């Protein structure tokens, strides 16, 4: 679904707990999409001693890396970026392991130091969340990285040995966990966080923006999403509150591992290590005095990829995350650019002229703009019910940079761009008071713009709107008489416009019918 000149890039991330391979199809600087992903629990750090990685852990890692390499060769992948993080860099036999991987499998793993691991995780997050000034936390299996962001750029980062697996192996000796183990865990977490200047308890100042990534934080978010019956199939922009983290910490503390595995949203293979990671997040949130953490699905792997994708930029972070998010989805699903762009133009003209009636501002205009570009994406599945398919694609893929509420509204606008009475059923938990009215008004505008471009030939050059207390009159400016557009607008869009703006709706044209052709 991306141009023929695209390339496939595979990123291998050999972590302390899990190994992952992601394959992305991309045209650098234009569009990309995730094509495939494999995750394997390797537990490379498990059983690590002063002598280094254990033989069984090495065997698991070699088996998995061999599988990943074969998968990439068969796909095929044009370029592989293979990396390893804290377990390999901390192990005494790390160099020997790297040599074995190179000789036996043909992968030259790049071992990232703590600073680079923090950098790439932050790079991935900044291409999903417009952070500005704030912090990024990544809790992995062997270490945790906390990064400072200023001006939407990575400024500095620190890596501390506070990974969920590492802490569990060293300090958790009971199941369910006993008070003594919890006390030792908290002491270790505090001691290591004190080594990060901006996280010292006495020096920390309130900061409102924290972004979280990594398996531990994603699982904590999934637990809360399950509690809420979160209606989106993605965690893009999900906000995890400090209260939720504390609630989950208390739940995990009292349950044995066997019962933790039954918690909705929690991956079964993380049940034994999630508690330690949750304590790390809770302490960091407490020190930064933030009430919530915004989830980033992007992380280290995406950061490594995006450094290449945005290599033509001075700094590999897109200037407007939200704008690129919409364009990327449109391009991935082969949107009809000319048609979508003209619908967008007409919708914007209608929105601006009707502003005194609807009272909406830039935030609502951005939602309408996004929906106008994405409204027909569902045709890639089937023309029949393509408005429903468009909603499905957005709900399942998500829109990086947008909140769950905004994503839901954009999806609903695409759902009702053709027909039906706009309804927020299924998504009301995400919406604010007054959003039903916003949905109605924007859907009416988008539907009218769609049918004014029904011929897909930009026949309607512009529109002008005037109204009084009883009538809203729209005049179409066109070189040729827009017979199709007038007919479609009156038949399919007039009723919703009348409902949304509480006036009779009249549509006419400056161009007159061509008598010769009966139009």
Image (tube, grey):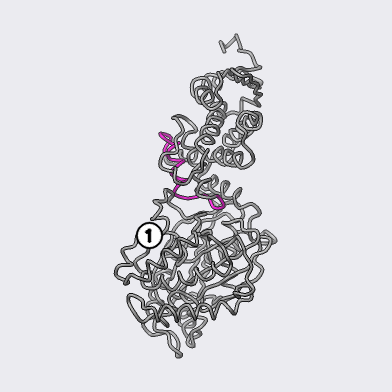
Crowding around mark 1 (Cα neighbors within 10 Å: few <14, some 14 to 19, many 20+) is some
* Mark 1, secondary structure of its residue: loop
Where 290 sits versus 482, above or below? Answer: below
Q: Is residue 401 magenta?
A: yes
Decide: is 58 above or below 319.
Answer: below
Number of numbered tags placed on the structure image:
1
Q: Residue at x 50, y 45 (%)?
A: 333
Span shown in magenta: 382-402
Image coordinates of residue 413 in percent, x first then y, are: 50, 37
Residue pictured at 64% horizontal, 65% vertical? 149
Quick one: 329 or 437, which is closer to the camera?
Answer: 437
Judged left or right of residue 179, residue 147 is right
Nearer the observer, 477 or 157: 157
Q: Residue furthest left?
A: 258
Q: Nearer the viewer, residue 274 or 105?
A: 274
Residue 294: x, y in percent?
A: 53, 58
Q: In the image, is residue 220 part of the stretch drawn in magenta?
A: no
> The C terminus lies in which quarter of the figure?
top right
Q: Nearer the viewer, residue 229 or 127?
A: 229
State the residue position of label 1: 265
Question: How far across and down, in percent of the image, does residue 67 sit?
Answer: 39, 70
Residue 316 spot, x, y in % from top left: 64, 61
């Amino acid at each position: 679904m991306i141009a023929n000149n695209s390339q496939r890039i595979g990123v291998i991330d050999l972590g302390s707990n899990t190994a992952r391979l992601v394959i992305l199809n991309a045209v650098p600087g234009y569009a990309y999409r995730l094509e495939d992903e494999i995750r394997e629990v390797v537990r490379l750090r498990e059983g690590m001693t002063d002598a280094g990685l254990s033989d069984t852990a090495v065997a698991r890692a070699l088996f998995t890396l061999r599988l990943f390499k074969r998968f990439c060769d068969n796909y095929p992948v044009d370029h592989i970026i293979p990396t390893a993080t804290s377990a390999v860099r901390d192990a005494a036999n790390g160099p020997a392991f790297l040599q074995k991987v190179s000789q036996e499998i043909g992968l030259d793993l790049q071992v990232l130091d703590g600073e680079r691991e923090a950098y790439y995780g932050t790079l991935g997050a900044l291409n999903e969340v417009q952070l500005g000034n704030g912090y990024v936390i990544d809790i992995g299996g062997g270490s945790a990285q906390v990064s400072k962001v200023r001006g939407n750029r990575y400024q500095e980062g620190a890596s501390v040995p506070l990974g969920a697996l590492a802490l569990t192996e060293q300090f958790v000796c009971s199941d369910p966990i006993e008070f003594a183990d919890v006390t030792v865990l908290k002491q270790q977490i505090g001691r290591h966080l004190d080594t990060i200047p901006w996280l010292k308890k006495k020096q920390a100042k309130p900061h409102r923006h924290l972004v979280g990534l990594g398996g531990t934080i994603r699982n904590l978010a999934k637990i809360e999403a399950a509690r809420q019956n979160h209606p989106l199939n993605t965690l893009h922009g999900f906000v995890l509150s400090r209260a939720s983290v504390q609630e989950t910490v208390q739940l995990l503390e009292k349950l044995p591992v066997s019962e933790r595995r039954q918690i909705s949203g929690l991956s079964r293979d993380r049940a034994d290590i999630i508690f330690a990671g949750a304590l790390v997040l809770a302490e960091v949130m407490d020190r930064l005095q933030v009430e919530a953490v915004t989830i980033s699905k992007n992380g280290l792997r995406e950061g490594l990829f995006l450094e290449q994708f945005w290599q033509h930029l001075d700094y590999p972070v897109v200037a407007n995350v939200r704008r690129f998010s919409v364009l990327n989805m449109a391009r991935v699903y082969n949107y009809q650019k000319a048609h979508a762009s003209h619908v967008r133009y007409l919708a914007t003209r209608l929105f601006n002229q009707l502003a005194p009636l609807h009272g909406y501002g830039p935030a609502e205009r951005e939602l309408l703009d996004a929906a106008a570009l994405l409204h027909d994406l569902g045709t890639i599945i089937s023309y029949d019910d393509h408005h429903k398919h468009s909603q499905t694609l957005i709900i399942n893929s998500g829109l990086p940079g947008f909140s769950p509420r905004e994503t839901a509204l954009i999806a609903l606008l695409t759902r009702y761009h053709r027909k039906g009475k706009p309804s927020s059923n299924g998504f009301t938990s995400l919406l604010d008071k007054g959003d039903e009215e916003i949905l109605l008004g924007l859907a009416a505008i988008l539907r009218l713009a769609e049918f004014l471009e029904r011929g897909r030939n930009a026949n309607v050059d512009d529109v002008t709107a005037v109204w009084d207390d009883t009538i809203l009159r729209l005049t179409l400016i066109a070189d040729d008489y827009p017979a199709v557009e007038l007919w479609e607008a009156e038949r399919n869009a007039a009723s919703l416009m009348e409902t949304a703006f509480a006036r009779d709706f009249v549509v006419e044209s400056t161009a007159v019918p061509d008598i010769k052709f009966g139009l």
